[in-house]
Image (cartoon, grey):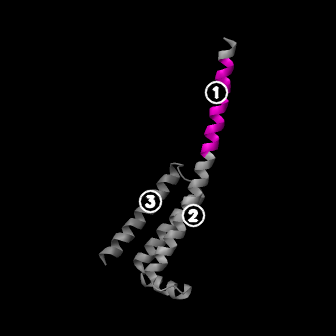
Amino acid sequence: MLMRLALLIVAILGIVHAVTRFRKRDIRPLELGLWAAIWVLVAVVAVVPEGTNRLADILGIGRGADVIVYGAVVVLAGLLFRMSVRLEQLDRAITKVTRELALREGGRHDGE
């Protein structure tokens, strides 16, 4: 019972944090929706933990806990992929800006 209450509190805090980050324009609406969905699922699991066992039966997975672990792995893999793509985009943008600045600075020194 205590663990269920702790999970529910963490889920509520997670939703509040996501909304706060959205209001500060740190995350986009799609990201807010993703994080809200994740935290709502955590809250549902906290309130109705036997639901994971039903879902496991439907999916042909042994236990409800396994469904949570598999789901977490899939979500984390997706987030890792998204972050790696974004990091590559940032790396290219930094390289482009650095080259442009170097060319401008080089042009100033040649003319002096």
Please state the horizontal and vertical placement of residue 77, each as a whole percent of the image.
54, 64
Residue indicated by mark 1: 102
Disc 3 versus disc 2: nearer the observer: 2
Q: Amino acid at mark 3?
A: Val
Lateral position of residue 13 relative to residue 81, left or right: left
Q: CA distance from mark 3 to mark 1?
A: 44 Å
Vertical side of 45 occupied by 99: above or below: above
Location of the N terminus by quadrant is: bottom left
What residue lies at 53% left-to-right and 67% top-to-bottom?
75
Whether residue 4 can be seen here: yes
Q: Which mark is residue 78?
A: 2
Q: Which mark is residue 16?
A: 3
Helix, strand or loop status at disc 1: helix
Label 1 crowding class (10 Å Cα cut-off): few <14, some 14-19, many 20+?
Answer: few
Label 3 crowding class (10 Å Cα cut-off): few <14, some 14-19, many 20+?
Answer: some
Vertical side of 24 occupied by 36: above or below: below
Lateral position of residue 5 relative to residue 54, left or right: left
- State the extent of the magenta-drawn residues as a range: 90-108
Location of the C terminus by quadrant is: top right
Please state the horizontal and vertical placement of residue 30, each as a whole percent of the image.
60, 59
Disc 2 versus disc 1: nearer the observer: 1
Q: Amino acid at mark 2?
A: Gly
Whether pointer 3 and pointer 1 mark residues with C-beta atoms closer than 8 Å, the reply is: no
What residue lies at 38% left-to-right and 65% top-to-bottom?
10
Please state the horizontal and vertical placement of residue 6, each as a whole percent of the image.
34, 70
Depth check, front residue: 106 or 79: 106
Q: CA distance from mark 3 to mark 2?
A: 23 Å
Q: CA distance from mark 2 to mark 1?
A: 36 Å
Helix, strand or loop status at disc 2: helix
